[in-house]
Image (cartoon, rainbow, N blue to C red):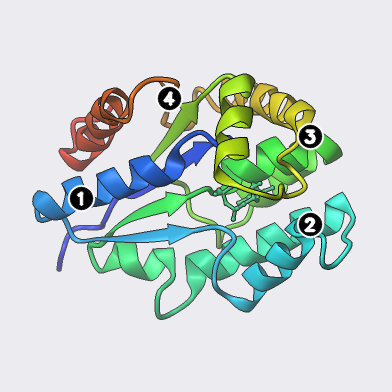
Amino acid sequence: MSEQGKFIVIEGLDGSGKGTQISRLAAALSERGVRFELTAEPTPHATGGLVRDALGGITKRTPAELAGLFLADRIAHCQNPHNGIAALLKQGVTVVCDRYYYSSFAYQGMDLGLDWVMSANLGCPAILKPDLCIFLDVPTEVADRRISLGRSSREIFEQAETIERVRRKYFEVFGILSDTHNVKIINAARTPDEVFADVWAAAAEILDGTEK
Ligand code: TYD
């Protein structure tokens, strides 16, 4: 039996450089011979399509509906028998996931209050707990500038005042989870190389099993 894979989540504001750091992490894992899969939320499953339609404004959803859709999508993401996170980890595959329930806490928690969003996710036995969450932290102005450079249109959570509220919510959430979750907050307003040095140090710590 192969050893259980590690479950690593990368979180950050839109424009925090998640994509770049995830690519670098993937390259470093390959180089090291670690079996891994990259995955993301919203997922490519049917539930993820519903989420994307809501985020793009194609289908209007209430904040509670959106939180419920993300929850359903996360359950599919964890439990799909073919490519679900649980199945991959069991096969010894390390999973690197672009956003997870910390995003629901920050984004949906902002509109709905944290209590039910957190209890619905953390209390659901089908939803797995990550071994590590890396939060790529950038000041709001940096996130806003990077979104402007990269895109011609913005999704519902990408307006500047919303970005600031989301960032504050993430920090509130990490405070609440500080005793129970392994969260590493990394200053991502630096060069990609500098940021990656810290990302790799955090990942290597759990891959080497030296994390406490
Ligand atoms: P997307 O453009 O797919 O990815 P990213 O911004 O990470 O490159 O957008 C995902 C959006 O969904 C982003 O604005 C955050 C939001 N989101 C939530 O509101 N709740 C969640 O639980 C997740 C996973 C994402």
Q: Residue at x 10, y 51 (%)?
A: 31
Which label was assigned to residue 66?
2
- The answer to which of marks 1 and 3 sits earlier in the sequence is 1
Q: Secondary structure at mark 4?
A: loop
Q: Secondary structure at mark 3?
A: helix
Circle 3 is placed at which residue position?
Answer: 110
Q: Amino acid at mark 4?
A: Ala
Q: Secondary structure at mark 1?
A: helix
- Tell me: is circle 4 under 8 Å from ligand 1: no
Circle 1 is placed at which residue position?
Answer: 27
> Distance between the Cα atoms at labels 1 and 2?
33 Å
Which label was assigned to residue 188?
4
146 or 186, nearer to the observer: 146
Would you say the residues marked 2 and 4 are in contact, meaning their CB atoms lie under 8 Å apart?
no
Left or right: where 70 falls relative to 62: left
Q: Quadrant of the C terminus?
A: top left
Q: Amino acid at mark 1?
A: Ala
- Tell me: is circle 3 under 8 Å from ligand 1: no
Q: Amino acid at mark 2?
A: Leu
